[in-house]
Amino acid sequence: MQHNLFISYDLNSPGQKYDLVANKIKALGSWAKVQKSFWYLNTTCTAEEAAKTVWSIMDSNDSLIVVDTASNDAYWFNLAPETSQFIQRHWAAKSHAA
């Protein structure tokens, strides 16, 4: 099954490897770079699978969110606690934080 994902991230340390993150995203399916750190991805991966794959090369102080527009699902890492809690309270379907 194909998924329409939006991926957004912040690399929070100097000298981050934007190319490595971009290449990891590109390897997951058909993609379009919407903005510097915001991507559209058409893939067989779920939001969770894509998030875990991209997060695997990111630093622990970075942040990442992947939103599946088809299934109304989201998965993220290292968002500010208040942001994570807000999304979980207001999300219309399921959402997951790691």
Image (tube, rainbow, N blue to C red):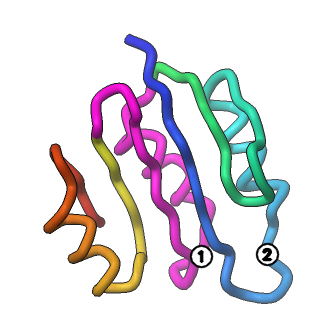
- Which secondary structure, mark 2? loop
Q: Is residue 59 magenta?
A: yes
Residue 91 or residue 11, whichever sits in front: 91
Q: Residue at x 39, y 40 (%)?
A: 47
Q: Given the image, on which type of amino acid does mark 1 rest?
A: Asp
Asked if the stretch drawn in magenta spans residue 56, the answer is yes
Q: Amino acid at mark 2?
A: Gln
Q: Nearer the viewer, residue 11 or 83?
A: 83
Q: Classify mark 2: residues with Cα within 10 Å, few (<14), some (14-19) or many (20+).
A: some
Residue under the image location 57 percent in, 77 percent down: 62
Report the magenta residues as a range: 45-72
Q: Secondary structure at mark 1?
A: loop
> Is 92 on the left or on the right of 69, as rendered?
left
Q: Position of residue 75 (x, y in %)?
A: 34, 53
Q: Disc 2 vs disc 1: Cβ atoms closer than 8 Å?
A: yes
Work out whether mark 2 precedes mark 1 in sequence or the reverse, and give the earlier one: 2
**14 relative to 37 in the view: left or right:** right
Q: Quadrant of residue 19?
A: bottom right
Give coordinates of residue 13: x percent, y percent: 72, 87
- Residue 85 — which label? none
Nearest the camera: 52 or 91?
Answer: 91
Q: Which mark is residue 59?
A: 1
**Which of the labelled discs sits on residue 16, or is there none?**
2
Quarter of the image that includes the C terminus: bottom left
- Determine whether, in the image, residue 55 is placed left or right of residue 46: right
Query: Is residue 78 depicted above or below 2 in this figure?
Result: below
Mark 2 vs mark 1, CA separation in Å: 9 Å
Q: Nearer the viewer, residue 53 or 34?
A: 34
The N terminus lies in which quarter of the figure? top left
Instruction: Report the residue at 53% width, 23% height from top.
Output: 43
Q: Is residue 70 above or below residue 21?
A: above
